[in-house]
Amino acid sequence: MKNDRFKFIYVCVLTASTIAVLIKAHFYPNKPIATVFEIPHTLELSNWSLKSSSVINDNQSTFQSGRDYQYQQNQHTIDIEIRHIVNTDGDVRDYLQVYQSIALTQSASIQNKNGFYGLFTHQNRIYLSACINPKGESTFTGVQFARNRNLFDIQPNRIALWLFSSTSLRDERCLWVQLSTTNRDRELLEKVWLDIYPSLQSHFSKSVER
């Protein structure tokens, strides 16, 4: 009897949940995420001098805002680009092709130091590229990004919000950061990345999703 009662309750809950999801999908479909996020004019980068900072304007439907910077330290110059991208699968290799027409002829060297990032060379420059996630560590591949979304977004409070509002179930935003320099100094890029990553991650995770 108790087993039958449990089955009945389980079927009722499952049926009610299914009906709620169907009603939500029909009357309150998900809308593209709009986010209040301002990319800083300068970065927290000690012992470097800011040479330039300008707005990036890209004509892509998922592109929200962007800024590029050039910093100098003695004889070293480094370029940094930051783009805020929404409704994305988080695959940096796709960003490279879409935004910069860079098709990697060789696989990027993916590293994991307080988060994932990729290193590669192109036309006598070395690049470090990563996707800062709204929650969780930085990523480079779509698989890493999806794992973060499943781990941090599929939570009871967000599921409830998704069921009864137009909020997407997953927070599919990425703050794409790319550093490059001409002297092929990998250690230099990694040091700068580890310097700017904590403040950018903190700033991005506090941005307001609507």
Image: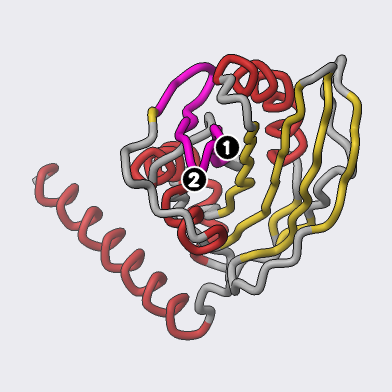
Residue at the spot x=34%, y=67% of the render? 16
Instruction: Report the front residue among 125 and 189.
Output: 125
| N-term-proximal mark, 2 vs 1 | 1
Q: Position of residue 133 (x, y in %)?
A: 57, 40
Indicate whether 154 appears above or below 181: below
Q: Which of the labelled discs sits on residue 181, or is there none?
A: none
Q: Do the residues labelled 2 and 1 touch (CB within 8 Å)?
A: yes
Residue for badge 2: 153
Question: Where on the picture, by quarter, is residue 61?
Answer: bottom right
Instruction: Report the front residue among 31 and 192.
Output: 192
Indicate whether 74 appears above or below 18: above
Q: What stretch is highlighted in magenta?
A: 110-131
- Disc 1 is placed on an element classified as loop
Indicate whether 188 appears above or below 132: above
Residue at the spot x=90%, y=26% of the render? 49
- Mark 2 belongs to which amino acid? Asp
In the image: residue 132, left or right of residue 45: left
Colouring chosen for the image of the structure: secondary structure
Residue for badge 1: 135
